[in-house]
Image (spheres, rainbow, N blue to C red):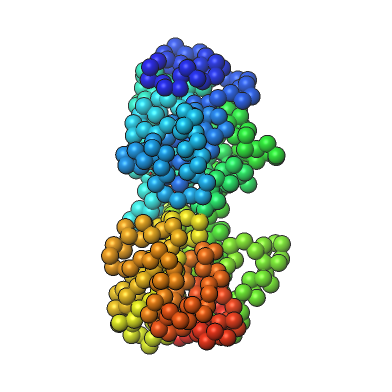
Amino acid sequence: MADYPFQTKIAPVFRERLCIEGWKRLKLRLSDDHSKGAVMQITVIGSGYVGLVAGACLSNVGHRVTCADVDAAKVASLSDGQVPFFEPGLAAIVKKNLEAGRLQFTTDVEMACRQGAIIFIAVGTPQGDDGSAELRYVHSVAESIGNCLSGGENMLVDGCKIVLTKSTVPVGTTDAVSEIISRTAQLPYVVCSNPEFLKEGDAINDFRKPDRIVVGTPETELGTLAQSVLRELYEPFTRTRERIQFMAVRSSELTKYAANALLATKISFMNDLSNLAERVGADIEDVRQGIGSDPRIGYQFLFPGTGYGGSCFPKDVKALTHSGEQHGHRLQILEAVDRVNNQQKTILLRKVTAYFEQDLSGRKIAVWGLAFKPRTDDMREAPSIELVNGLLDAGATVVAHDPEAMANAVQIFGDRIELKDNHYECLDGADALCVCTEWSVYRRPQFDELVTRMRQSLIFDGRNLYDHARLEKHGIRYYAIGRGEPLPV
Ligand code: NAD
């Protein structure tokens, strides 16, 4: 048993259930007698924004968690208590539980799979060349789980390993994972869908107080067992009210895509409308409040801007559209959502270019905000990338600032742009300022200082942060989204 560093510490109720013999010799116990508060042995494969948050939060309520990742540098830094990306509050929880011995990190995926009675698959599902979700990482983890279930010592709960797809995966993937495991597994297991709904920037809060926990289980005895185990697993996060929604596996997988697709639709709808508002002399911010106050519509995700980015909405909209095509049903609304978003991502570039009459050579443009949204360092699919690349291609120089995303910006732009630690320093001698991300530090700038530092007092605001009348008083020309003076874009 030396392979299990936590073995001596786990609750007796689970120690009893460690099954170390071939599955035919196992007496499968299906029961819902999980004693309240039992420590569970959990494995999370993939230590990114989703996996690490899940692992950290589950260890923080007392479970023993092994997080595995193929990225050796990431594992080394996490083992040292350093979180290699920015997510508010996460580093402190990781450090605390690492020190308490409840959380460990490894690159040995198969060993980690043996250790976990419950295994979360939380690896990336990036966009493939044809828009579909790339599932090779998920499938590779499924193979590792199958291998570890082919024999040897394995930690099981009630004689069974519970595998959960937490990554966002197209309908049918959870069944495919189960099939891959079955090729080599000799011990019992059940694969369920448990998609993640957290928001980067508020991920800890979302995990601890989720709106809902969606779990798709197969309609089998093992599926019923999984339901009772997962109810217990999530009990610390569902104390105020019932939050677990059990459903069929395929419904659960589709629920995740439906949620992201609908939120993306709201954003694209408002962005599309904002372009009309400019042309007809309406103020999209007034329109936003006018419709948001209708409780059937609500205020959330109605802010116009420079298009959605990040690691989820763009790829999930495309993957769902692709699924539709595969199954002979075009999702025409989503096709339009994606098209509108691609156009909107160039809105600031088109405005700057139109203002300078198609000639940006020699212009110096300051950019505030590079992350795809505030409170994260994530720049995946960030609208700032399109803007900066377009400005550089047109011959401008770019000086940029972001409170957290500068390291990622170096990875993306190298030395093609200048990065400043202080956002005011970007403005020195600049012909224009573009605001890409609504970090709070940009919300109330000292406009006098801005005027003093810039060569031209000119702002292109992709987030509608400022008041037009106030800027006019400072002598600043101001172009926003869906309001104020239009430009021929
Ligand atoms: P991420 O890219 O930050 O992390 C994925 C991790 O998996 C990486 O560290 C990578 O090294 C690791 N990995 C890849 N293949 C592996 C393998 N075979 N074995 C072990 N580790 C492996 O991704 P993320 O943002 O955490 O997203 C993970 C999944 O969750 C995706 O499907 C995503 O769509 C979904 N999701 C993301 C968010 C979000 O806000 N980021 C929210 C909800 C759902």
The foreground one among 422 and 105 is: 422
Residue 442: percent from left, percent from top: 51, 68
Vertical comparison of 198 with 280: above or below: above
Counting labels gives: 0
Please identify the residue farthest to the top as the structure is shown. Answer: 25
Q: Is residue 110 visible?
A: yes
Residue 382: percent from left, percent from top: 42, 62
Vertical comparison of 345 with 68: above or below: below
Residue at 47 percent across and 38 percent down: it is 95
The quadrant holding residue 138 is top left
Q: Is residue 164 visible?
A: no
Vertical comparison of 167 with 153: above or below: below
Residue 101: percent from left, percent from top: 47, 28
Residue at 43 percent across and 66 percent down: it is 422
Work out which quarter of the rendered image holds the N terminus and state it: top left
Residue at 47 percent across and 71 percent down: it is 435
The foreground one among 476 and 357 is: 476
Residue at 58 percent across and 62 percent down: it is 301
**Quarter of the render that holds ligand 1:** top left
Work out which quarter of the rendered image holds the C terminus and state it: bottom left
The foreground one among 459 and 388 is: 459
The quadrant holding residue 184 is top left
Q: Is residue 30 left or right of residue 78?
A: right
Vertical comparison of 71 with 288: above or below: above
